[in-house]
């Protein structure tokens, strides 16, 4: 976008996206406010869309990123092997021999017109049924925040989970989906969350997997504004409808520990599905210095350049051997495995160079939609 676009965004955008703006009061504004919102959403996404294909070509040919494009592999659990499938947006499917976890699963990808015209968003059940892997091994779902591209599909997917699987996230998640998912299946992790490097506690998801929730942050979408920011304080009597109804709530990062039979950590993954600034997303020193290193960091690429020293401050402290970038593709294009292209204006080459400057020995990967990476859990390999 050029400077003219940003001036328009500032003029039209400051009313609906000012901090403290109450979405529930939006019906009191004249209809033209909604047209302004439509314009803001449309131009913020489409105004620089021409850059996307060029960036894909550049990243594919010139970068040292490891691009993983195998969409034929299975998510089925294997002894001694871990797997990660990139679903799309911030979503991943983690498979371990002992069980699996879904994070921010999202397949529906509403188009630009649906978003900009504030249409009611609903899960694309046909796409979900076609591409969602079997959930027999999934014991838990983790949600980083409650924007539509992280939680829209959750009510439909929840109906496919095994009976004892639970969904972990913020109070806003629990309140937003109060009518769609049984309350006992939605676990509010905020009381267990670490904040500014202090406090927090491990939560057992199942006998061989635990999670440590950490308060994080969401990078702004337009200027300094986060579209759909704020919390839902009380249970809603309906599922959120349009893009602005889906309020982010508290943003949460997670440390995930795979445990052995003695409850000692075998493998540790950090996952954060929105860009942040220091110290947001960092676990306390008591956790990071407990003798188990972070093996893999799964990090959001979207809007990384808007947050100071992101993701360097996370990587410098955690020093993972593997880095996987998610939320890098246009999540408003029709869902098709292996066919995603980068977000407009997102320089993956520059992000890789920044990561490589901090962790020159780390393996940095990007997966195409539905692609799967696998690695050995044997510490000797």
Image (cartoon, rainbow, N blue to C red):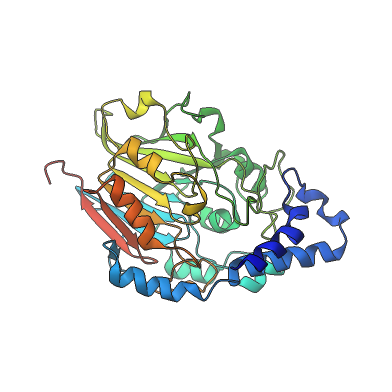
Point out the image quarter for the N terminus. bottom right
Residue 60, image x, y percentages: 32, 71
Task: Indicate whether 381 appears above or below 203.
Answer: below
- What is the count of numbered marks? 0
> Is 35 placed left or right of 291 in the picture?
right
> Is 173 placed left or right of 264 in the picture?
right
- Residue farthest along the front direction in this orientation: 3
Residue 355, image x, y percentages: 33, 50
Task: Indicate whether 197 appears above or below 128.
Answer: above
- Residue farthest along the left direction in this orientation: 380
Q: Residue at x 58, y 64 (%)?
A: 123
> Is 42 placed left or right of 311 in the picture?
right
- Front residue (pair 202, 63): 63
Residue 342, image x, y percentages: 44, 67
Task: Indicate whether 119 appears above or below 272.
Answer: below
Q: Residue at x 69, y 42 (%)?
A: 232
Q: Is residue 118 visible?
A: no
Q: Residue at x 62, y 38 (%)?
A: 171
> Is 364 placed left or right of 87 in the picture?
left
Q: Residue at x 16, y 43 (%)?
A: 378
Residue 156, image x, y percentages: 56, 58
Q: Is residue 197 visible?
A: yes
């Amino acid at each position: 976008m050029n400077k003219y676009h940003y001036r328009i965004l500032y003029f039209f955008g400051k009313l609906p996206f000012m901090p403290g703006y109450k979405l529930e009061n939006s019906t009191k504004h004249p209809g033209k406010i909604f047209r302004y919102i439509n314009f803001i959403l449309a131009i913020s996404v489409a105004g620089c869309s021409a850059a996307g294909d060029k960036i894909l070509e550049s990243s594919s040919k010139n970068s040292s990123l490891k691009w993983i494009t195998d969409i034929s592999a299975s998510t089925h659990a294997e002894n001694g092997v871990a797997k990660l499938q990139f679903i799309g947006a911030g979503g991943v499917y983690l498979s371990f021999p002992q069980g699996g976890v879904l994070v921010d699963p999202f397949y529906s990808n509403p188009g630009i017109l649906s978003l900009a015209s504030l249409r009611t968003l609903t899960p694309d059940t046909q796409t979900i049924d076609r591409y969602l892997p079997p959930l027999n091994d999934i014991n838990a779902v983790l949600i980083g925040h409650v924007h539509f591209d992280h939680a829209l599909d959750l009510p439909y997917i929840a109906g496919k989970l095994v009976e004892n699987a639970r969904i972990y996230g913020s109070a806003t998640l629990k309140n937003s989906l109060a009518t769609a998912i049984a309350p006992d299946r939605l676990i509010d992790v905020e009381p267990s969350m670490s904040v500014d490097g202090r406090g927090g506690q491990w939560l057992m998801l199942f006998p061989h997997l635990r999670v440590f929730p950490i308060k994080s942050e969401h990078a702004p979408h337009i200027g300094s504004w986060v579209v759909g920011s704020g919390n839902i304080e009380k249970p809603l009597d309906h599922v959120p409808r349009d893009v602005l109804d889906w309020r982010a709530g508290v943003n949460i990062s997670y440390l995930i520990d795979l445990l052995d039979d003695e409850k000692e950590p075998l493998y540790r993954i950090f996952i954060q599905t929105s860009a942040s600034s220091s110290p947001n997303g960092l676990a306390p020193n008591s956790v990071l210095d407990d003798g188990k290193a972070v093996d893999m960091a799964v990090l959001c690429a979207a809007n990384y350049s808007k947050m100071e020293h992101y993701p360097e401050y996370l990587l410098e402290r955690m020093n993972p051997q593997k880095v996987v970038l998610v939320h890098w593709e246009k999540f408003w294009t029709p869902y098709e495995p292996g066919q995603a292209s980068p977000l407009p204006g997102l320089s993956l080459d520059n992000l890789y160079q920044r990561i490589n400057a901090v962790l020159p020995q780390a393996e940095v990967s990007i997966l195409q939609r539905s692609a799967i990476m696998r690695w050995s859990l044997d510490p000797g390999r």
